[in-house]
Image (cartoon, rainbow, N blue to C red):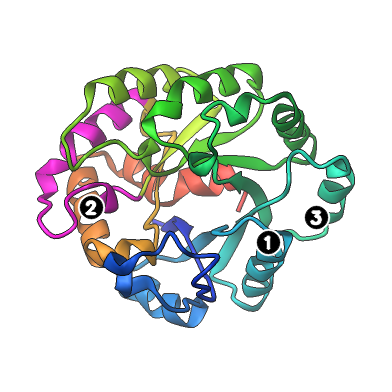
Amino acid sequence: MLKIDSHQHFWIFDPVRDSWINDQMLAIKRDFSPVDLLPVLQQHGIDGCVSVQASQTDDETMFLLDHAAANPFVKGVVGWVNLKADDLDEQLQQYKKYDKLKGFRHVLQSEPDDQYMLQPAFQKGIGMLEKYGYTYDILIFPQHLPFADQLADNFPNQKFVVDHLAKPHIKDQQISDWKRDIEALAKHENVFCKISGMLTEADWGNWKPEDFTPYLDVIFNAFGSNRVMFGSDWPVCLVAGGYEGTRQVTQSYTSKLSVTEQEQFWGGNAISFYNL
């Protein structure tokens, strides 16, 4: 079984750019590089990873591509590009020379406009991704799900993946509205979901494995075993249980799946989605 971590980050810590890392997150207030990640992956039997953007600059994309070029275990990169740029078509054409660049992401959850993803200029950019075979990672909060549903409906042939289950309010045990909206989004066959970032949506110091079961039940029932993938969200996960806790929770839940379903979840779906 080839195992892929579909979601992790590298960064050189910058207190201004990375102001989202507050004083309660001291464990990740430092640099993180492939040298830090490789032994963690080896410890947990993970064969490779997909590195995802953490800041919104073209330099960030090249930073990740440089790491991927120097480290064979980094199988793919989800970078950032200004999807509203007038010269987006030319930029995407230039990026095609980087085999490990698989897709793009924008931090939609931080935009003041909840419907940012439905703005005409942004949608025009999304419409160009399919032409070049690029995926798109949807980073949102639960209130954005209805707009993501519309986005997926507008682009039925574009490959989308929802990061971190759309960050349900696990700590507060809120599930009903999120369940309704994530199930609606999952009806689009072109949308996948990453089982990632759960621990940081729970009570960091007091979560229990069973806290996540209702949410995982919803995701697996809605998307099926062929559209879900494992992601650690390392190093962000270090603030709430680390790689060990993340993998244990996920391993415990998926152990009830068939061998084929486990192979899909732990690696096959990521390899297929990102064309690794």
Look at discs 1 and 3 and give the one toward the viewer: 1
The percent position of residue 162, horizontal first and vertical second, equals: 47, 37
Dot 3 crowding, Cα within 10 Å, few <14, some 14–19, many 20+: some
In magenta, the rendered stretch is: 197-222
Please identify the quarter of the rendering in which residue 88 is found. top right
Residue highlighted by disc 2:
251
**Helix, strand or loop status at disc 2:** helix
Mark identifier at residue 111: none
**Helix, strand or loop status at disc 3:** helix
**Helix, strand or loop status at disc 1:** helix
The percent position of residue 206, horizontal first and vertical second, equals: 9, 56
Q: In terms of depth relative to the viewer, which is nearer, 22 or 32?
A: 22
Identify which amino acid the numbered label 3 is placed on.
Tyr
Magenta span includes 62 = no
Mark identifier at residue 95: 3
Q: Is residue 196 left or right of residue 98?
A: left
Look at discs 2 and 3 and give the one toward the viewer: 3
Asked whether the residues under the numbered discs 2 and 1 touch, taking CB atoms below 8 Å apart as contact, a structural biologist would say no
